Image: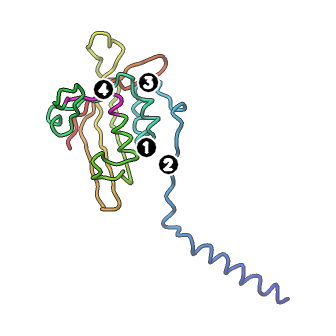
């Protein structure tokens, strides 16, 4: 056996061991979330719409999120939360129990990418929204005039924000009541009424 052939095997073994030492098979690298194109997200029915809401949160994709909301979207708070997180939407200096599309998009963009507006919290390292979408038999028809084709869907939810730096988790749970409406061949969230337990 030539000197070259005798050296080849140990050299190959050393290269393989060096390559393996740089990789920990028990701690694979974190993967970046796939950035789904909002045009590819189908909302052909209310269930698909709410499933895409979870997708928008898991991917932190503000464009998908915006595509799920109707132009006249409203986020509504229960009365006990108004003083705590209400926003003055009418300009009278008093917190209101709702906010509209633009404010919702800004708040959600902050949650996804920027952190809290008061700079107390950075964006979470993990963001998870889980909805318990009930069967259609539990959906309610919207009694308001002009909303004959709308549905009100009460969903149990759990929202968890995990922060690695200080090893903390913020969570909210409760019921979210979604008023959803069809426009053309798509469904949109018209009202998100929060009934959470902070």
Disc on res. 45: 3
Q: Position of residue 78 (x, y in %)?
A: 18, 32
| Residues marked 4 and 1 touching at CB (< 8 Å) | no
Q: Is residue 56 above or below residue 145?
A: below
The stretch of residues the image draws in magenta is 96-104
Q: Secondary structure at mark 2?
A: loop
| Residues marked 2 and 3 touching at CB (< 8 Å) | no
Residue position marked by numbered label 2 in the rendering: 33
Q: Is residue 59 left or right of residue 90?
A: right
Q: What residue do we see at 77% from left, 86% from top? A: 7
Q: CA distance from mark 4 to mark 1?
A: 20 Å
| Residues marked 2 and 1 touching at CB (< 8 Å) | yes
Dot in front, 4 or 3: 4
* Quadrant where the C terminus is found in the figure: top left
Q: CA distance from mark 2 to mark 3?
A: 25 Å
Q: Position of residue 44 (x, y in %)?
A: 47, 24
Q: Is residue 41 left or right of residue 124?
A: right
Q: What residue do we see at 41% from left, 18% from top? A: 182
> Which of pointers 3 and 1 lies earlier in the amino acid sequence?
3
Residue position marked by numbered label 4 in the rendering: 74
Q: Position of residue 70 (x, y in %)?
A: 39, 24
């Amino acid at each position: 056996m030539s000197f070259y052939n005798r050296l080849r095997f140990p050299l190959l073994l050393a290269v393989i061991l060096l390559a393996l030492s740089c990789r920990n098979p028990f701690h694979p690298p974190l993967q970046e979330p796939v950035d789904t194109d909002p045009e590819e997200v189908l909302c052909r029915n209310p269930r698909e719409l709410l499933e895409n809401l979870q997708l928008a949160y898991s991917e932190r994709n503000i464009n998908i999120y915006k595509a799920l909301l109707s132009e006249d979207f409203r986020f509504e708070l229960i009365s006990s939360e108004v003083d705590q997180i209400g926003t003055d939407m009418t300009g009278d200096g008093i917190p209101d129990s709702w906010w509209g599309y633009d404010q919702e998009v800004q708040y959600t963009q902050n949650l996804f990418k920027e952190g809290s507006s008061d700079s107390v919290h950075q964006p979470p390292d993990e963001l998870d929204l889980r909805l318990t979408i009930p069967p259609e038999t539990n959906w309610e028809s919207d009694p308001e005039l002009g909303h004959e084709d709308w549905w009100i869907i009460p969903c149990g939810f759990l929202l968890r924000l995990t922060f690695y730096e200080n090893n903390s988790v913020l969570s909210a749970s409760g019921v979210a009541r979604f008023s959803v409406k069809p426009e053309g061949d798509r469904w949109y969230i018209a009202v998100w009424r929060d009934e959470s337990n902070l």
